[in-house]
Image: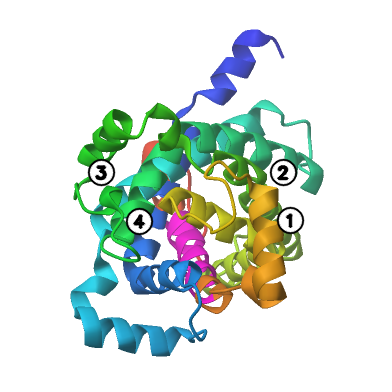
């Protein structure tokens, strides 16, 4: 196939449908389980306190700050998630078709998902920096950057003007290292789905199976990469450690946490993270598969197999 054919496979209605469906599915899932994401962020940022479980933290937040705090910053998170997953799904499925050479393999999925992850991180990190700040507004030691904006756009401008352009990409290194998280997730998801589809003689799996596959894939990815996610959250928040320079890197922070808090500190908040991300990813994949099949049936006039 020549170069034009490759371009046509990269930029198609089908790839666009996958991107829109992935973005919509992620928004539905995050909106459903958003309070768990708030709890996860709070647990990760706690220092010097007795660790709490998810339910205890929810009760504490509701009692001290009101139930609305569980949904603080939800709108900019959904906006960023929509943009981020559009980029990721479009790149992943576009590159997957571009590299298609007969049967897909787990290695091919891992490579394509990694490239899509790098592109996604470099283009959307500023959105997530602002989101972390908004979610933690008023928490901690009253950092000025937590209290002077309330929207995604204002936050981007504020950090750019008063903290410098580089701070919009705070936590980029651990984010790039964390590209392995969605890469492992998508590789696992696609591999399991291919095996199940083959066992069903090409018929798509039932809806509950998409949910289960998504949950398994996210559990594997999160368990392998959680310490890096912890550092990423702290860097985006602008958290400062005593006895560490302000520009301390990912590895140095990981070693500091390990020394001061032990292995438990490396996995602080993981219970909430697993609960939130596994449920969110599972629902996202379910919504994504349903939306994409429905839209492809309409736009591309493809018969949708009954599930």
Which callout, 1 or 3, points to the residue nearer the camera? 3
Residue at position x 58%, y 45% in the image: 175
Specify which label sits upstream in the sequence, 4 or 1: 4
Q: Quadrant of residue 71?
A: bottom left
Residue 183 image position (x, y, % from top left): 66, 48
Toward the viewer: 51 or 274? 51
Circles 1 and 2: CB atoms closer than 8 Å: yes
Circles 4 and 1: CB atoms closer than 8 Å: no
Tag 1 residue: 191
Specify which label sits upstream in the sequence, 4 or 3: 4
Compute the Cα span from label 4 to label 1.
Answer: 24 Å
Specify which label sits upstream in the sequence, 1 or 2: 2
Magenta stretch secondary structure, dominant: helix
Circles 2 and 4: CB atoms closer than 8 Å: no
Is 287 part of what is drawn in magenta? Answer: yes
Which callout, 4 or 1, points to the residue nearer the camera? 4
- Can I make out residue 118 in this image? yes
Compute the Cα span from label 4 to label 3.
Answer: 16 Å
Tag 2 residue: 109
SS under mark 1: helix
Is residue 92 positioned above or below 146 on the image?
above
Residue 271 image position (x, y, % from top left): 56, 79
Tag 4 residue: 27
Compute the Cα span from label 1 to label 3.
Answer: 36 Å
Toward the viewer: 137 or 163? 163
Compute the Cα span from label 1 to label 2.
Answer: 8 Å
Which label is found at residue 152?
A: 3
Q: How many other residues sit within 10 Å of disc 1, few (<14), some (14-19) or many (≥20)? A: some
**Residue 3 placement, left or right of 70:** right
């Amino acid at each position: 196939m020549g170069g034009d054919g490759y371009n046509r496979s990269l930029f198609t209605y089908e790839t666009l449908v996958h991107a829109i469906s992935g973005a919509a599915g992620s928004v539905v899932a995050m909106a459903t389980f958003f309070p768990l994401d708030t709890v996860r962020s709070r647990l990760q940022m706690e220092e010097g306190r007795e660790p709490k479980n998810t339910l205890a933290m929810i009760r504490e937040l509701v009692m001290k700050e009101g139930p609305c705090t569980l949904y603080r910053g939800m709108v900019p998170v959904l906006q960023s998630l929509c943009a981020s997953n559009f980029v990721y799904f479009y790149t992943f499925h576009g590159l997957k078709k571009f590299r298609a050479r007969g049967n897909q393999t787990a290695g091919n999925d891992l490579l394509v998902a990694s490239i899509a992850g790098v592109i996604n991180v470099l283009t959307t990190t500023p959105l997530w920096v602002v989101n972390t700040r908004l979610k933690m507004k008023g928490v901690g030691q009253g950092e000025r950057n937590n209290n002077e904006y309330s929207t995604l756009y204002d936050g981007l401008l504020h950090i750019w003007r008063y903290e410098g352009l580089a701070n919009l990409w705070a936590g980029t290194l651990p984010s790039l290292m964390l590209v392995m998280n969605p890469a492992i997730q998508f590789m696992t998801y696609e591999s399991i789905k291919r095996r199940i589809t083959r066992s069903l003689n090409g018929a798509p799996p039932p809806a509950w199976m998409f949910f289960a596959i998504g949950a398994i894939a996210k559990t594997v990815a999160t368990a392998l990469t959680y310490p890096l996610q912890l550092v990423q959250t702290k860097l985006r928040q602008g958290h400062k450690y005593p006895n560490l320079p302000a520009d301390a890197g990912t590895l140095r922070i990981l070693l500091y946490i390990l020394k001061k808090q032990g292995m438990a500190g490396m996995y602080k908040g993981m219970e909430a993270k697993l609960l939130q991300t596994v449920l969110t990813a599972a629902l996202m994949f379910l919504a994504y598969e349903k939306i994409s099949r429905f839209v492809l049936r309409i736009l591309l006039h493809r018969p949708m197999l009954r599930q």
